[in-house]
Image (spheres, helix red, strand yellow):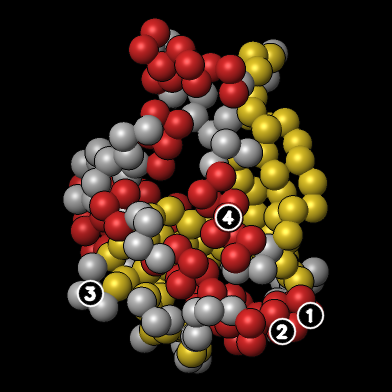
Amino acid sequence: MWIAIGEKTRIRKLEREDVDRMRYWGKHSNPLFFHYNFPSLSKQERDEWYRLKAGKFRKKSFVIENSENEIIGFLSIRDLSWFKSEGELGIVLDPNHMNEGYGTDAISAFLAYYFRRMKMRAITLRAAVYNERAIRCYKKCGFEVIGEEIMEFEDQTAEIFYNPKYQEFTEMFIRSDRGMMTKYVKMELKRGNYEHSINSMSTKTMWKCE
């Protein structure tokens, strides 16, 4: 059952067999995004990956499909607070299908489900400052920057920290007692602002009940 349908994408709950299909995704060529590559996992490890992503009270996970029924992305809401009616968005796309408008379309479709079906009050996300493409996408979907902070980088063992050929990227990081740090922006979209801006969005969406 689709929970949301956009012009280019359809979103539904993550299933175990989806994880097997995601392992055939492409790979990022930019070392700053290596940690977004789908990991090489054994069947047992994929079982565990699915278990960690699905079925938690404070987390919901979904896949994004295109019109050819290809799984081209993964979307999650983590740190769900049902009392505060808010959560944090995370999204990863197959590198083979980036720059095709799928990210904006999928997020726009999902927001209709999030605010209208789940009846949530606000949604937040974090993005590394250097990830300018993603930040532009989020702004296009209505998110606003509400702050910046220095945080631990997601992959503390990233190749950029020890491979000399990636030395040019190290200036984006700060070494501290907590590990390698970088600057992130925190972005937010509130339901009132979403409802106000939805008519001006270029991506028209529909939403369905589960």
Look at 35% across and 62% down and name the residue there: 100
Q: Are marks 3 and 2 in contact (CB under 8 Å)?
A: no
x, y percent for residue 66:
29, 73
**What amino acid is labelled 1 in the image?**
Gly
Q: Please state which of residues 81 and 6 is positioned toward the viewer in this rendering.
A: 6
User: What is the distance, in whole Å, between disc 3 and disc 1 at their CAs?
Assistant: 33 Å
**What amino acid is labelled 4 in the image?**
Arg
x, y percent for residue 203:
50, 79
User: What is the distance, in whole Å, between disc 1 and disc 4 at their CAs?
Assistant: 21 Å
Give the label on residue 192, or none.
1
- Quadrant containing the N terminus is bottom left
x, y percent for residue 104:
49, 67
Q: Earlier in the sequence, mark 4 or mark 3?
A: 3
Q: Are marks 1 and 4 in contact (CB under 8 Å)?
A: no
Give the label on residue 136, or none.
4
- Mark 4 vs mark 3: in front: 4
User: What is the distance, in whole Å, between disc 4 and disc 2 at their CAs?
Assistant: 20 Å
Q: Kindly state the secondary structure of the residue where label 3 is placed.
A: loop
- Mark 4 vs mark 2: in front: 4
Residue at the spot of label 2: 195
Residue 146 in the figure: left or right of residue 103: right
Residue 110 in the figure: left or right of residue 191: left
Q: Are marks 1 and 2 in contact (CB under 8 Å)?
A: yes
Q: Please state which of residues 123 and 99 is positioned toward the viewer in this rendering.
A: 99
The answer to whether residue 118 is visible is no
